Amino acid sequence: MPAHEGDPGRRAYDVVIVGGGHNGLVAAAYLARAGRSVLVLERLDHTGGAAVSTRPFTGVDARLSRYSYLVSLLPSKIVRDLGLDFRVQRRTISSYTPVEREGRATGLLVGGGEARTRQAFARLTGGEREYAAWQRFYGMTGRLAERVFPTLTEPLPTREELRRRVDDEEAWRALFEEPVGVAVEEHFTDDLVRGVVLTDALIGTFADAHDPSLRQNRCLLYHVIGGGTGAWDVPVGGMGALTDALADAARSAGAVLATGHEAVRIDTDGRGAEVTYRTADGEGVAAARHVLVNASPQALAALTGDAAPAPAEGAQLKVNMLLERLPRLRDTSVDPREAFAGTFHIAEGYAQLATAHAQAAAGDLPAAPPSEIYCHSLTDPTILGPDLVERGYQTLTLFGLHTPARLFERDNDAVREDLLRATLAQLDAHLAEPLADCLATDADGRPCIEAKTPLDLERDLGLPGGNIFHRDLAWPYAQDGVGRWGVETPHANVLLCGAGAVRGGGVSGVPGHNAAMAVLEDLAG
């Protein structure tokens, strides 16, 4: 980064953005392209937030998506509007879920064409019923996705307006009114198939299938509407390719990106504001008409002096690995290059997920921790150096479920090691060789594996309680106290553009886009 970008230079801007994660960069690019003067204050020495690519293993040329890792919710509208040099690659396999039945290693492979998927369902379940139910269920969510996804970059609809737009009472009931466990159990009878469907309701969300809060429904909703199809794609070049492109777009439009600048206070009278920030050299103040906060609702409250919202809690384990080769599977009917290309589900049967949740809710680590894995480098080998590609190295990304932050408070390091050991043991149960035998080593001879708990994510990224969504996900419609764009706060000229905004969560850029639209409307009006 050029040295002058570390210094805001001028004192007054049209907009100051606190936080240089992807949403803040989206807002900065839109506002700067509209001719507004924009300053982005980023606490870390780099922009990107959780959507970054790094080389976590010493002396190894593997640039991994360290935190966020797949793209679904980023509207193509944002990519087009900002002229981003960024693309995604579709995975040929959706998922593979291994299981042992009647003493035989088998599993369910979804993808590779309709005929092959149908055959995989029949092989697992012994008939056509579950595949037909699968088609009905995802046909329903697909129709809903086509109608809901375009609304994310529009002013918030009311609940009734969104219901009319969905125009499907079965879909509305299944996702918006009843616990999603009801629909899963109505549609499917096979425990493994039920579990595969439920997992998308539990990513970063600690809930049971029948949780009356419906937080699991909101999580499933955001997992099935992306792009109007629900497809989850691989960012070419890693997640950092997106935030690098966004930073370039903001910078080229005239925004100032100041890293190593930590905002510590926002003073506002509703018409003008001042943001006090801290650097290694002391404190400074930047004045602005509008302030956008690309951080959590907790961080926003701390900056403005308002009452803090209810505590948030994350519930996931994130593991990054580099392998010398993919492990062989006990289920010899599936090529590991296909099994790991999509989402590889581990210990995620329906009953297993319920048991894991109950154990964690009682204060214990799940005895069989559920998780899912995918291999970025099978779809996009550009994240590996040419030598590693030639030698057949592959990455693995693991995301564990049902491990709330409270479980790590006693001893984060010790519990992390226990959980990692138990999680990999669940994977090893489906492998024909131990995963440890396949791990690459770094320049110091250490295995290329790193694990992050919710408490690690809170420390590294400022995620409250390690919650990847900053708080429970919100319904994508207006409710009491929510403004026109879902980014408004009690202060007229201070907006929330992070994942905690309405329609936030995931790598979408939606809160950044919507906050920018709210500012431009206010300046025009």
Image: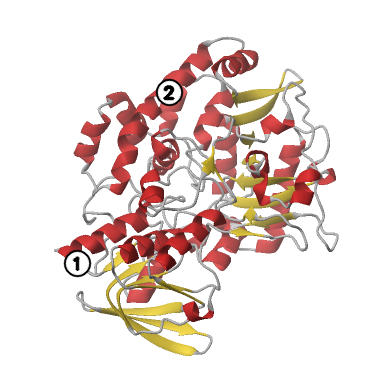
In the rendered image, which residue does mark 2 sit on? Answer: 137
Give percent across and percent down for residue 260.
Answer: 52, 78
Q: Is residue 192 above or below residue 52?
A: above
In the rendered image, which residue does mark 1 sit on? Answer: 523
The residue sitting at 77% across, 23% down in the picture is 332
**Nearer the observer, disc 1 or disc 2?**
1
Amino acid, disc 1 = Leu
Question: Please, which residue is most extreme toward the top here?
Answer: 127
Colour scheme: secondary structure
| Tag of residue 263 | none
Image quarter (top left, top right, bottom left or bottom right) of the N terminus: bottom right
Q: Are the residues at dot 1 and dot 2 in contact (C-beta closer than 8 Å)?
A: no
Amino acid, disc 2 = Phe
Q: How many residues crowd mark 1 within 10 Å: few (<14), some (14–19), many (20+)? A: few
Q: Is residue 206 above or below residue 221?
A: below
Left or right of 361, for residue 179: left
Left or right of 402, for residue 286: left
Give percent across and percent down for residue 480.
Answer: 21, 53
| Helix, strand or loop under label 2 | helix
Image quarter (top left, top right, bottom left or bottom right) of the C terminus: bottom left
Question: Please, which residue is most extreme toward the left here?
Answer: 525
The residue sitting at 36% across, 33% down in the picture is 145
